[in-house]
Amino acid sequence: MTQHSSTHEAGWRFDNSYIRLSDLFYARQEPTPVRSPKLVLLNEPLAASLGLNPEVLRSPVSTEVLAGNRLPQGAEPLAQSYAGHQFGYFTMLGDGRAILLGEQLTPTGERVDIQLKGPGRTPYSRTGDGRAALGPMLREYIISEAMHALGIPTTRSLAVTTTGQPVHRETELPGAVLTRVAASHIRVGTFQFAAKWGSVEELRALADYTVERHDPEAATADNRYLALLHGVVERQASLLAKWQLVGFVHGVMNTDNMTLSGETIDYGPCAFMDTYDPMTVFSSIDRQGRYAYGNQPAIAAWNLARLAESLLPLLHEDQEQAVQAAERAIAQFAGLYQRNWLSGMRAKLGLFNEEADDQALVDELLALMQKTRADYTNTFRALTLGTLEETSLSGTAELTPWLERWRARLGRQVENAAASQKLMQASNPAVIPRNHRVEAALEAAEQHGDYSVLERLLAALRQPYAYVPEQAEYAEQPERSERPYRTYCGT
């Protein structure tokens, strides 16, 4: 496949550093052309921030690039190798249906990965076809952009292109390619792969590369690799708290789905919780609830322990001291997570300062929400608007004494009621990508080629803290159903 000179007009500015690592970490692989590509979604604000020209990206030549039929100038396509614990079991993996085109240098000096998801087979595809169906790619576009608007670190979606040819799963589905943007695709599983199949020198090279890309301040630390581990622990503690605060359920927290950059990655069977329940599971394959909403922080700590194990040869030449250093680093996660989460919960309740009983105040509210099967997002939205009487909490014996304690707590801080409400509005989204709304948008696009439902949903999600009338219909809860909502990986 040749590079096309006119793609330079789009603004591609590649400088590909990952490919300068040992070829242990990747296989050079070009995308497989598709029959008749058509651009169906383009994230114009993201494109502009990357230094790309949205108008040129809508051209036929750029559509060919976004579908994998042409290479942009400067691209050096590759599929990354990695391993991972999938539901607790270790296996070799790799990019079976993703190809990294290269690293775009943005106008602000950032370096980001540009990856095609669904562009054909790679050496890591095993028995897969390397393709992706339209529905899951649209889902990733919706959820990742919603997460970005919520202020949660995430990979982003630049474009979705249909391929004009079907993919065969349980049924025949329309094919598509997603263009994903990430700080990097370096995962816990990348380090697991290096530790298992690489030399210590290759493991060190990967760690040095990751330090340079994500933790440059660690380069001057007494032990840069320990500093890297601490940095990842801190980022993941912050990320997991943000997930929990908005009721996000990732669904498949395998170690290959945890990045060292601290971004959310791989929106397979993900969904947002409606009814508050710590044991909420959406994924059709998570039959034991390993990745349930309430288990996510503990699973993150487990994954980080696997990263620490991979780094042991670099942490100290003495094995025992290396293990002790790793254990101390991982032990910090629980406290960091708890501080981040409780700080976020205080903001959701309009609290600016700290008191010893704040944890109990939060726990009592959550217990009441679980008891009454309250909607997670709408309960905090109603608390912000002063309309709790419209929620399932109304009329319960526990609500009045809780409200009295909360109002007394608000009265013990310097900030006035208006400041508290402003803080609550900035911390409690009025809208999330409700599962029934996402499904309606996907059905209209997949079955009828109608993207207007999806576009309206995206518009409502772009400012989740706006609290404007136009968002009201997207805050509505789904009708009660005896059948639990289920999501699928979309592979």
Image (cartoon, rainbow, N blue to C red):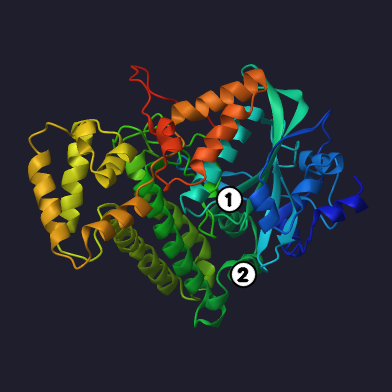
Residue at the image point whose x is 57% and y is 28% from the top:
453
Helix, strand or loop at disc 1?
A: loop
Residue 234 seen from this side:
yes
Pair 1/2: label in front: 1
Three-letter amino acid code at the position of disc 1: Thr
Does 237 sit above or below residue 478?
below
Q: Camera-side residue: 113 or 170? A: 113
Disc 1 from disc 2: Cα separation: 26 Å
- Taking 98 as reference, is 60 left or right? right
- Taking 344 as reference, is 79 left or right? right
Three-letter amino acid code at the position of disc 2: Arg
Residue at the image point whose x is 41% and y is 59% from the top:
238
Callout 1: few (<14), some (14-19), or many (20+) C-alpha neighbours within 10 Å? many
Residue at the image point whose x is 47% and y is 54% from the top:
151
- Taking 319 as reference, is 199 left or right? right
Q: Quadrant of the N terminus?
A: top right
Q: Which mark is residue 165?
A: none
Name the quadrant containing residue 173: top right
Callout 2: few (<14), some (14-19), or many (20+) C-alpha neighbours within 10 Å? some
Q: Quadrant of the C terminus?
A: top right
- Taking 409 as reference, is 189 left or right? right
Q: Camera-side residue: 100 or 447? A: 447
Q: Which mark is residue 204?
A: 2
Determine whether label 1 and label 2 are within 8 Å by CB.
no
Could you tell me residue 169's position as x and y percent?
64, 21
Could you tell me residue 109's position as x and y percent?
68, 69
| Residue at the disc numbered 1 | 155
Q: Earlier in the sequence, mark 1 or mark 2?
A: 1
Q: Camera-side residue: 348 or 387? A: 387
Could you tell me residue 346's position as x and y percent?
26, 57
Residue 3 seen from this side:
no
